[in-house]
Image: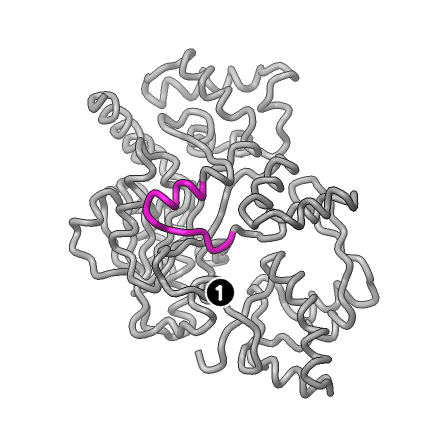
Amino acid sequence: MAKGRNRRDKAVRDQYEQLPYPPRNPEDEKTRLITGSPSQLDEVNHYLFRGEQDFSGPFRALVAGGGTGDAAIMLAQQLADRGDEGTVTYLDLSSASRQVVEARTRVRGLKNIEFHTGSLLNLPDMGFEPFDYIDCCGVLHHFEDPEEGLAALKSVLADGGGMGLMVYASLGRTGVYHIQEALKLLVGDENPEKQLPLAKAFVEGLPSTNWLVRNPFVGDHKMGEDAAFYDLLLHPRDRSYLVPDVIDLLKTSDMELVTFLEPVKYDPENFVKDRDVLKRIRQMNDADKAALAENLTGNIKTHIFYARKSGDLPGNIAETGPDMIPVLAERTPAEALAQTFRGKKIFQVSFDGEKVNFNLPDRISELVSLFDGNRTLSDIQTEMSLGGDGFRRLFAPSFKLLNSLNLLWLRKKGT
């Protein structure tokens, strides 16, 4: 048993030494910053720190299994842009991946990342001070024992801190594991240089009835990058999760779910129209609703979520109040979003091919145009000449919609 595990551990390490993933060109840092969830600072603040974190002090972030560096670069750049004294610790078992991140860091001129090579399983013995925030995306599902990996992460998480995690989702990856099993039979444990040509020829000739061919949501094998193809279909150790599996995984380390992202995808009410069915759904708890939504849509490829220690004080998600500032996601300029809503009653969103219509709340365009990242809710209420109750009735549905789409968060004034 131990011999088999050691062989797979070596195979995983060898893969990322030969094929760092995801493939990145450091020179691209001159023209763009890759962002996403989890680990956008305003998003982290909203879901894990009640919108009250100022990211100084200093703020300590760990990117565990950092790969070629997207999360580490994003966190470090955001901290640097704000002038905050936060630091990012990067850890990965692949020295080749680390070289890519270090090169990207040099291009950007970042000075707030420290680099370490090794397995996150060694975290309890590496002598780190506790981290306020831990990013671990696309990693735990490659462990022989994901529970062991999560326990190692928790051992260096500060009380009151939290994690941003991503693991593969089962239903949206339908077909992936069928092909993985087929390729194990075909090319076995051969060197990647020998596996890739045969595997590509095999996949190129798949019949139209094959589940991977019929799955329109998975396309990494079509990118033309060896690293992407290998990571999807030839990975030596890979598993996926359903919603209940995610919750059970967290429980093994006495952790609990804060939220899945985007929340709207995990609300089955958005995909059901029958009144009797909706009535039954509204009687469910949040975990069962999320599981139902996953089975209902069938297109979720990854579970991205925030988690925290179960024993921490409740109430970590930011709540509305007069001194809270509504903050739009950086990729969403206020005026552009306001213009999108202006004059419309319905807003249509597509989730991997499934189109959903949302009723737009009253005056949402006017509200959004005032979300400049500086005005508090009290300021906005004054500008709209509304009383307290009237403003709350106006703001609540707009916030619910935009937050569920992961476009709007809250930050406390002064942070």
Residue 318: in magenta span: no
Q: Which residues are magenta?
A: 246-259
The residue under the point 36% across, 62% down is 312
Image location of residue 152, percent across then percent down: 26, 46
* Quadrant position of residue 53: bottom left
* Helix, strand or loop status at disc 1: loop
Q: Farthest top residue?
A: 186
Say which residue label 1 marks: 317
The amino acid beneath tag 1 is: Ile
Q: Residue at x 29, y 49 (%)?
A: 153
Percent position of residue 47, x then y: 48, 62
Query: Residue 253 in magenta?
Result: yes
Q: Position of residue 238 (x, y in %)?
A: 40, 30
The C terminus sits in image quarter: bottom left
Residue found at x 29% / y 51%: 154
Against 273, residue 316 (above or below) is below
Q: Nearer the viewer, residue 220 or 388?
A: 388
Number of other residues with Cα within 10 Å of mark 1, as a class: few under 14, some 14 to 19, many 20 or more: some
Across and down, in percent, residue 306 comes to: 45, 54
